[in-house]
Amino acid sequence: MCWSASADLAAGAVITAVGVACVTRAARTRRRALPLAALPLLLGAHQIVEAFVWKAGGGTGPATVVWAVIALPLLPLWVPFAVLYAAPPRARRRLALPLAVGVPTSAALAYTLATKTVTGEIRGHTMGYAIGLPYAPWLLGGYLVATIGALLLSGDAGLVRLGVLVAVGAALCTVLWRREFISTWCACAALCSLVLYGWVRAEPRATHTS
């Protein structure tokens, strides 16, 4: 994924279709899962937006800004909230942690986007993004706690498996594409939408992992 504008468009179309299926299914059977079920719609749109970044040759245009808004401040706020809303009651107290981490992380990233210029740059077959984040290791840590941590602490076996899959994908992206981590990781997360669709389709169970 993220290898070209056409790859992003194709991926975005498929993932958006998965998102439509997720939302349709959740609306019928798992209404508390709706925010989480809508995540593939957001990720699919994200991939489509990146296709426009490719077509613009990177740079600082509107597509780059929209892409960065979704990737940076929106996801670390959306994911822990959506998981908290969908999680079994006994897991909600511990899920306050990733949400509490996600809120200031999102605020810091939003402030950075509002005060600095984000730039997209084509680097071979990936798209790199630069914004000059202050305290980058702390913000990245907060980002991962808010997103992956929420899934791992969800108390739902399917979401925990999804969290493990995303964590492994994040590690691989770091090793293979260190400079383009944020772009490739978001593509990995988008592909995990297929796993999320399987979770939405599954009937809620009375027992969950602790």
Image (cartoon, rainbow, N blue to C red):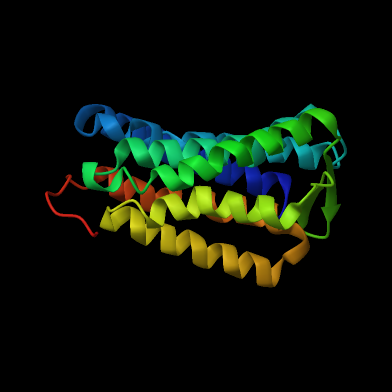
Query: Which residue is pictured at 88% across the width and 38% down the height?
Result: 59
Q: Position of residue 8 (x, y in %)?
A: 64, 45
Left-right relation of 115 to 111 = right
Q: Residue at x 56, y 54 (%)?
A: 144
The front one of 100 and 206 is 100
How many circles with numbers are drawn on the protein?
0
Name the foreground residue: 127 vs 98. 98
Q: Is residue 203 left or right of residue 126?
A: left
Is 146 rendered above or below residue 123?
Answer: above
Residue 120, image quadrant? top right
- Residue 104: name its quadrant: top right
Measured as percent of width and height from the top left, residue 127 is found at 77, 51
> In the rendering, at what x and y percent does residue 205 appear?
14, 49
Quick check: can you spot residue 94? yes
> Quick one: quadrant of the N terminus?
bottom right
Residue closest to the eye, 38 or 150: 150
Give 47 or 152, whichever is nearer the viewer. 152
The answer to whether residue 204 is left or right of residue 136 is left
- What residue is drawn where x is 41% and y is 40%? 18
Direction left: furthest residue: 206
Residue at left 82%, top 38%?
118
137 lies above or below 116: below
Residue 48 visible somewhere in the drawing = no
State left or right for residue 83 relative to residue 179: left
| Quadrant that contains the C terminus | bottom left
Residue 68, given in percent of the width and then of the height, sits at: 71, 37
